[in-house]
Amino acid sequence: MTGRDDERCRTDVAVTGHADSAWAQELLDHLRPTGRDIARVVDWLGATVGATVSLRDENGTPLAGPPTPLDEGLVTDIATGRLASASWEGDGRHVRLIRVELPPPAVAGVLAVVRTAPFDRRAADIVTHTAAALELLLRAQRTTATGHRLARATADLRLAILQLLMVEDTSAARRVAAGLWPGLLDTDTACVYVVESTPEERDRLAEACIEATREQSLVVRCPAVDAHVIVVTPRDTAGADLRDVTRRHPDTFLGGSARQSLAHTAAAYGQAVSALAVAHFRPDKTAVYAERTHPERLMDPAVLRAWTTRLLRPLDTLAHHTRAELLATTRLGLEFTAVSAAKVLGVSRNTVRARMERVENLLGADFSDLAVRAAVHLALNTEAGLTEDRAHAASAPARFGDLLTGPALRTWAHDLLARLDTDGRDLRGTLRAWIAAGGNAERAAQLLGVHAQTVREHVRGAEPVLERRLLAAGSDLYEVVLAHLAAGALDPSDLHLDGRPDVPPDVRPDVGPA
């Protein structure tokens, strides 16, 4: 048996001065980033010295290699540090045991090498240096695992901040961010960008976004879409930085929002996703929401504000945080599916549906109707930018039909839908029937007397013509619906979206908590 003086070479894994040093190069290869595997090193050692090799911790739990019967008392002495190594022979076996430091919470392990032939100088050197290499690998694994845990915790924290912003809890979001990113959210306004690549490339893309924005932006791996990275940034130069990322990474697209109040991050996110759809049709693969004419900008601002305030007035009976929560959830639920909205908000899809049903009931709206969804979506986005007193804004009477009568809006609607006439198929008629059927291809097919697949193909064919996503719910689809309403292709009179009559405070219904 030997003590700690036998460790004279254990920290040096390079071997010199031996005629047969090929094994040293092989051992070094196992230390390269692409070859770091404890089990492979143990197997390699067994094959190189012609032995049965195993590695176990101080409790006897196997870490690599097949279990080997050993003198447990001697193993305990080595694991506890009383001995650094030991060797003996008997029963036709030659055994060598070496202590191997393990990362916490373990203390130490024992490398056991059992041969039928005695250990010569070469075999002894290989075993000693392999033990040192195993310690290096275990230490590297611990560092790597710690780095992965830290990266995961940081990513979870970024997502938590985004989810707080999505429900307009900016104070809590600032408090959470202050610890790791001081000053990141010390702003009143910000832009949201969505960068799209592939799920396989997303982690690398997220790191590129963090580097490009100099860690002065909130970069989050989207919980709803595996190919998306969300960037919330107050920096004016972030758009240019992210465009550089897009240029450097093939098959990458970028959509950006207009600058919004930090409390309206959810609305900005919807804008960025809408712009991302347009980016797929652009040569430079980028688009910003403000680059396109949107129907709400062509409506009378006073009428739009008055109608919005009147429509959403039933929600004013709620506590402020409840109202904000319902509005944020409904805005995302109208923009995306309930499942995607739930992932973004960090709640269950049943919670999203329950909140949206509550808003439906309060507004007396039917969200199964695409025209109703488009109108409520318009109101929610308008409300997000409404800063004046709501009571004052609602003083003028306003109806939903009044919003659709302006000449600028009607011209925009006719010009947009006229693009469909350039296709030899009846895209306009199919799209009108599909919208009237609530986006259901089967019902639209029955109305038109065609196959449902024909309806889907026509709707899909209309997307590049209109430069808008239609098969996915969201701003693009709702703009096309509003165009049909403004152009007279759909009748807005049956939507019942002019707001409920004012209810005196003493007889308002008890709507309860969210």
Image: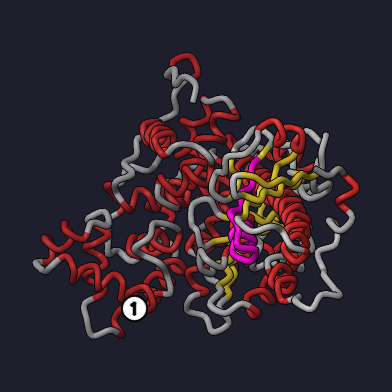
Find the magenta span and give its range: 41-56
23 is higher (above) or lower (below) than 100: below
Q: Quick check: 163 left or right of 303?
A: right
Which residue is farthest left?
449
Q: Nearer the viewer, residue 292 or 89?
A: 89
Task: Please give the name of the residue rendered at 83% of the width and 44% of the height, measured from the top-left corner.
Answer: 2
Task: Please give the name of the residue rendered at 66% of the width and 51% of the height, measured from the top-left corner.
Answer: 94
Residue 158 position, x and y percent, is 67, 47
Q: Amino acid at mark 1?
A: Ala
Q: Quick check: 52 left or right of 147?
A: left
42 is higher (above) or lower (below) than 387: below
Q: Can residue 263 be seen here? A: no
Which residue is farthest top?
506
Residue 148 position, x and y percent, is 68, 51
The residue singled out by tag 1 in the image is 418
Q: Is residue 413 magenta?
A: no
Assess disc 1: are there few (<14), some (14-19) or many (≥20) residues with their C-alpha within 10 Å of its C-alpha: few
